Amino acid sequence: MQAAGPIVVLEDVHKDYPLGRTVVTAVRGVSLTVQRGEFMALAGPSGSGKTTLLNLIGCVDTATSGRVTVDGHDTARLKEKGLTKLRLERLGFIFQSFNLVAVLDVFQNIEFPLLLQKKLGKAERAARVNEIMERVGLSKQAKQRPAELSGGQRQRVAIARALVARPALVLADEPTANLDSETGERIIDLMRELNRAEGTTFVFSTHDPKIMNHADRLVRIADGRVVEGTN
Amino acid sequence: MGTAILMSLRNLRQGGRRTVLLMVALAMVTLLLVVLNALAAGLEATMLRSATTLSSGHVNVGGFFKTTAGQSAPAVAEGARIREIVEREVEGADYIIDRVRGFARIVSENASLWCALYGVDIAEERGLRDVLQITEGTLDEIAKPDTVLIFAGHAKRLEVKVGDVVTLSAPTMGGVSNTVDVRVGAIARDVGWMSAWAMFLPKDTIRRLGQMRPDATGAVQIYLKDPNRAAEVIEALRPKLAAAGFRLMDPDPRAFWMKFETVNGQDWVNQKLDLTTWRDEISMMLWILTGFATIRFFLLGLLMLVIVVGIMNTLYMAIRERTREIGTMRAIGMSRGGVMRLFLLEAGGLGLLASTLGAAVGSALALGLNAARVRIPSEAFQAILMSDTLLLALNPVNVVTAVAVITGVTCLAAIAPAWRAARMRPVGALHQVG
Ligand SMILES: Nc1ncnc2c1ncn2[C@@H]1O[C@H](COP(=O)(O)OP(=O)(O)O)[C@@H](O)[C@H]1O
Ligand SMILES: [Mg+2]
């Protein structure tokens, strides 16, 4: 399934949100290419359209106009099922508020995408989960529930969950915004390390200058437009 | 699947008081369902027992004899031959008897009433011996000529006691009126209100009253080891009797004494046999069962409706609270079907747990009430329920069915909320404020 070519191609993408009688344009004509293996930051002030852009790339929202190509698929041509499959097989998500399943423990949260994929047997899944737990330094917390973890630990679980199924692209929307700056930097370093070791593409958004400096490539947006960092 | 079940159970526990309340409600409805089912089954069992003691076998081979087209008697000639065929052909019979049937006005010094008469050979009446509770006189008295066994209700209305003489007055086969004096030999406790319609006498006394031939009888009554086979036995028996030269009436699910008008309206003469089940013979009282079933249906339907609303409400709330979680799961690749299954599983788990609990408590209650032999306070209810104590028959199939129905309803109620959850867009999970 390893398609050649860039992992993400945005061509003149627009996104409007209807808001009462008016229309809010969150993204106005973004063209952007992300190469495989990149570690890219999407920087911009609050309201600039970072989340919207990540949603479009992450196939959880559709563009009003323009073309979004992810891993070789024109997402406008995929139906609900196809988009779900693409997300499940090729994408990983890390959220600002971690978004772990509260009733599952660390191990089960990380195992979740593997269960959805239904590809691996129990033993293989356990091996995979244990390996990634080791990588993010959570082996001791396997049986703990999210509520028993610190913010940094929760985000590590989220990172492990995003990576366990070995996606081609991981999208992280302000992954450090709910963490103190030291923990935030460590989280970014961990992502960076995994990016290097696995070759997984990372696109993360942030408005924190310290965090964006950890990126290989910085794309700045403002008012729904790319203002710096296009190829 | 294991994880999905785990999630549902833990989410249910997370639901806290909301889940507990819903579970209690579901358990109560299941309990009610189990107890009412047991009551209905008890009622049916009582009816079966009274009917088969008083007026019917599980299967009856009776018939009508007509001297002219418009004049019928509930009797058949060649009773012995019919009985012989039945004894030879019916499989799975517990025992077989025959009774002479009649219908007469019973006249005492102070009052009179109409009643169905059964001519019996008391020695072979096993059912009567088991069920009748004789309060005055003895059952064996009825072996003597020109005696009668009456019920407490009759004794009260006729103002008679054992040893008193009453006069039976009835039209004969020939169409003229005839009377016979009989002595009250025994008085039995009422068996529900069906006993108001039955008295027992020696066979020859009824034959004499109706001026019937000595080989005449009313019906051969077959008691089966498995009463549920009644219809099947009839199917097998009809061709055998036809082959032996007997004419058969078309099936008519009514008691014999309700058929005179129909039979008199038909233009055949001599005799035809009529095969009925115990249900046919008490068809006029099946309304009690139907009525009970109807009340049960509406009561439980109403409660179920309340439950359905409760479940839907709870699930909608749960879904709203878990919007982000659902969106997250959708974003990381769970299908709509997967989300739907998750919520159905949650509701199903709730239904199964609650209804199992309710069924367990309900079963215990039914068994306890039955063992306690609770007296029914009102005579009207005693009459309708055909017993002076509360009878509950707990049937494992009914209990399992109750659990299945409640769980099923819970799942059905969950469909719409689960569908809404499944339709939620994953984007909800990613959008953060600010
Ligand atoms: N669902 C929505 N409905 C209406 N307006 C929205 C919606 N989501 C985002 N917006 C608007 O789009 C713009 C970009 O938002 P967003 O992509 O969340 O920016 P960022 O993530 O950079 O803060 C903002 O003006 C925001 O108010
Ligand atoms: Mg945002």
Image (cartoon, coloured by chain):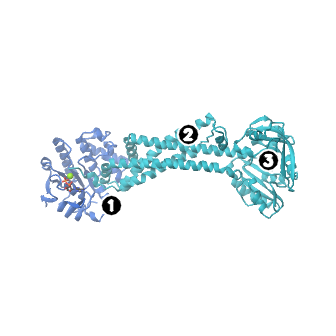
Name the residue that disc number 3 marks. B117
Q: Quadrant of residue B372?
A: top right
Q: Position of residue A191 (x, y in %)?
A: 20, 48
Name the residue at the front extreme: B110
CB of mark 1 near ligand 1 (< 8 Å) = no
Locate residue B63 relative to residue A35 in the image: left or right: right
Quote the CA–CA distance across marks 1 and 2.
48 Å
Colour chosen for chain A: blue
Which element carries disc 1, helix, strand or loop?
A: helix
Q: Position of residue B284 (x, y in %)?
A: 69, 52
Query: The numbered mark 3 sits on a residue in which chain?
Result: B
Nearer to the camera, B228 or A186: B228
CB of mark 2 near ligand 1 (< 8 Å) = no
> Badge 1: how crowded within 10 Å, few (<14), some, or many (20+)?
some
> Badge 3: how crowded within 10 Å, few (<14), some, or many (20+)?
many
Which element carries disc 3, helix, strand or loop?
A: strand
Co-location on one chain, circles 1 and 2? no
Name the residue that disc number 2 marks. B363
Residue at the (74%, 40%) spot, across then down:
B153
Is residue B120 visible in the rendered image? The answer is: no
Locate residue A130 relative to residue B139 in the image: left or right: left
Rendered image: mark on residue A80: 1
Colour chosen for chain B: cyan
Quote the CA–CA distance across marks 3 and 1.
77 Å
- Amino acid on which disc 1 is placed: Glu
- Amino acid on which disc 3 is placed: Leu
Residue at the (70%, 56%) spot, across then down:
B253
In this view, A202 is above or below A102: below
